[in-house]
Image (cartoon, grey):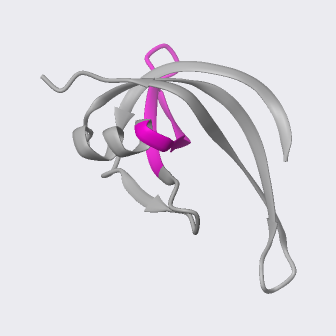
Amino acid sequence: MNGEGRQLFMGRLGKEPDLRYTRKQKAVCYLSVAVTDEEAQKTNWNKVVVWGKQAELASQYLKKGSDVFVQGRKLLKQFTTPEGDHKNYYEVNASLIGFSNL
């Protein structure tokens, strides 16, 4: 994993939050956040990982279509498929998320 820098953005959830627990029972929630660039008429999707109490709250209060604010560090994740291909993707490890449940 290589650190790629701080991220700060606001977007909309593209699917329901996915809450899981590690073997040591630490909460982790995976979010898919769409950020639309109006000028370029393009939508960028961000994989976001939230940990601990924030993860549980995100799972409880966020739904598909919810607006969410994300602050965190963008990381390059790398893995090898069973066929031996090397794959890369970016993920934002959130230090702070914000949302309104109105």
Query: Where are the magenta residues, as a range?
Result: 29-53
Report whether 16 appears left or right of 27: left
Q: Nearer the viewer, residue 40 or 52?
A: 52
Q: Measuring 42% from the left and 36% from the top, which residue is drawn there?
A: 54
Please, what is the dominant secondary structure of the magenta stretch?
A: strand
Where is residue 76? Give x, y as percent.
78, 44
Residue 83 % position (x, y): 81, 86
Residue drawn at 85 percent across, 48 percent down: 1
- From this view, report whether residue 98 is shown above or below residue 74: above
Q: Nearer the viewer, residue 87 or 29?
A: 29
Name the outermost residue toward the left: 102
Q: Can residue 63 be seen at all in this image of the molecule?
A: no
In the drawing, does residue 53 fall left or right of residue 6?
left
Give the residue furthest to the bottom.
83
Percent x, y for residue 50? 51, 41
Looking at the image, is 4 positioned above or below residue 1?
Answer: above
Q: Quadrant of the C terminus?
A: top left
Residue name at image x 56 percent, y 63 percent: 22
